[in-house]
Image (tube, rainbow, N blue to C red):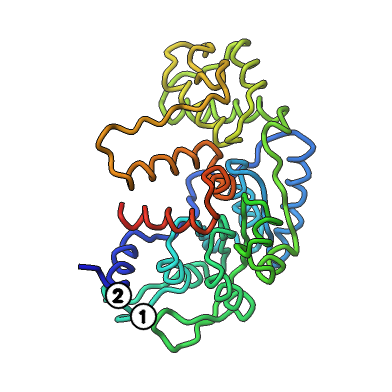
């Protein structure tokens, strides 16, 4: 029997939680390149202003780090920083995530719930992957930002909040505007100030400082003596493409720290894609008897991984519209 949409929403809401800033580690934007120095200067300037900021750049470049630094250097630093990944929630859930609900708003809504706007009151609300939000929800988001008021789902009370809004995207903005995935009015609301973070391959002089930071971090985390990369390993790290940017470099360093028992980390402790097999695509093995839906999911997820989770690029490779891809991803989450 087909479940009612409200029941599906109730089930999905049990897994929907906003992401608060962790006080354990201060955000850092590490590097000595001209680009990083310019970004650090921009952060210092915009932190003192209440205006919205749009942060752009490839996946893994550190967009959320920039958002957290803007918050940390602002007058709101003692208040909440709430991050919302706009691509992580289906359309049925994202409005509840943003605005909350009153008791009885839908099946399973027994206690009332505060949304991210309320949780971030007095602080900063960061919308990651803004272009992944459904256009209909973008309309409601824009209204809440401009009027500084909203209503919980199922409620009739106007709630006023004081939040600063920041947003980020790894999408091609021109393409997203052209297809309608990103509304022009919302884009112009956020793009008063834009901060672009270039990919790591365009600022290789930052790699040594990043490596040193991650080595220290993971040595402490895994209670290991300080290690260093050999000259051969350093050369490979400096030459790598880093399609996944700083996030990929961080993962490579963590892997090396865990796997290497010695003080010097030799190239054999680096992934094959770094040591000479970069760019090769791993085959997708689908066992005989796999359902069509499971095979489709495997192909889509593998394609997303190959383009660092860029939905627009993945959709093009798969021969789908971007909206069709988002629909399939939403379906995967509902059946997980």
Residue 124 position by quadrant: bottom right
Residue 273 position by quadrant: top right
Q: Nearer the viewer, residue 237 or 123?
A: 237
Q: Residue at x 65, y 41 (%)?
A: 29
Q: Are marks 1 and 2 in contact (CB under 8 Å)?
A: yes
In this rendering, would 335 be left or right of 328? left
The N terminus - image quarter? bottom left
Local crowd size for mark 2, using a 10 Å CA cut-off: few (<14), some (14–19), many (≥20): some
Q: Is residue 102 above or below residue 77?
A: below
Query: Does the image show residue 26?
Result: no
Q: Is residue 174 above or below residue 136?
A: above
Q: Is residue 305 above or below residue 99?
A: above
Query: Does the image show residue 138?
Result: yes
Q: Residue at x 30, y 81 (%)?
A: 104
Task: List x then y, in percent, for residue 210.
Answer: 62, 30
Task: List x then y, in percent, for residue 118.
Answer: 48, 72
Q: Residue at x 64, y 49 (%)?
A: 66
Residue at the outermost bottom position: 156
Judging by the rendered image, the residue that carries numbered circle 2 is: 109
Residue 102: mark = 1
Local crowd size for mark 1, using a 10 Å CA cut-off: few (<14), some (14–19), many (≥20): many
Element at label 1: loop
Q: Residue at x 67, y 55 (%)?
A: 175
Task: List x then y, in percent, for residue 59.
Answer: 59, 43
Disc 1/disc 2 C-alpha distance (Å): 7 Å
Task: List x then y, in percent, for residue 150.
Answer: 52, 80
Q: Is residue 178 above or below residue 274?
A: below
| First of labels 1, 2 by sequence position | 1
In this rendering, would 181 be left or right of 198? left
Residue 149: mark = none
Element at label 2: loop
């Amino acid at each position: 029997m087909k479940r009612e949409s409200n029941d599906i929403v109730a089930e999905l809401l049990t897994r929907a939680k906003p992401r608060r800033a962790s006080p354990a580690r201060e955000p850092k934007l590490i590097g000595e390149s001209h680009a990083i120095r310019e970004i650090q200067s921009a952060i210092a300037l915009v932190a003192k202003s209440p205006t919205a900021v749009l942060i752009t750049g490839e996946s893994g470049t550190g967009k959320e780090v920039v958002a957290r630094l803007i918050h940390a250097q602002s007058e709101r630093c003692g208040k909440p920083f709430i991050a919302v990944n706009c691509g992580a929630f289906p359309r049925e859930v994202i409005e509840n995530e943003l605005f909350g609900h009153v008791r009885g708003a839908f099946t399973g809504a027994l206690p009332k719930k505060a949304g991210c706007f309320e949780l971030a009151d007095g602080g900063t609300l960061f919308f990651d992957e803004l272009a992944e939000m459904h256009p209909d929800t973008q309309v409601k988001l824009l209204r809440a930002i401009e009027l500084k008021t909203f209503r919980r789902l199922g409620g009739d009370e106007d709630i006023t909040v004081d939040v600063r809004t920041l947003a980020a995207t790894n999408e091609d903005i021109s393409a997203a505007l052209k297809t309608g995935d990103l509304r022009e009015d919302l884009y112009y609301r956020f793009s008063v100030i834009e901060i672009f973070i270039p990919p790591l391959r365009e600022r290789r002089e930052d790699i040594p400082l990043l490596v040193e930071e991650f080595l220290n971090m993971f040595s402490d985390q895994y209670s290991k003596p300080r290690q260093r990369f050999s000259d051969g390993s350093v050369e490979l790290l400096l030459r790598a493409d880093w399609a996944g940017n700083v996030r990929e470099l961080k993962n490579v360093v963590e892997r090396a720290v865990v796997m290497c028992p010695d003080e010097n980390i030799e190239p054999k402790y680096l992934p094959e894609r770094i040591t000479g097999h970069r760019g090769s695509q791993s085959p997708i093995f689908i066992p005989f008897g796999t359902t069509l839906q499971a095979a489709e999911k495997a192909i889509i997820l593998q394609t997303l991984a190959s383009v660092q989770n860029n939905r627009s690029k993945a959709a093009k490779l798969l021969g789908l519209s971007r909206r069709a891809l988002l629909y399939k991803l939403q379906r995967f989450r509902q059946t997980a």
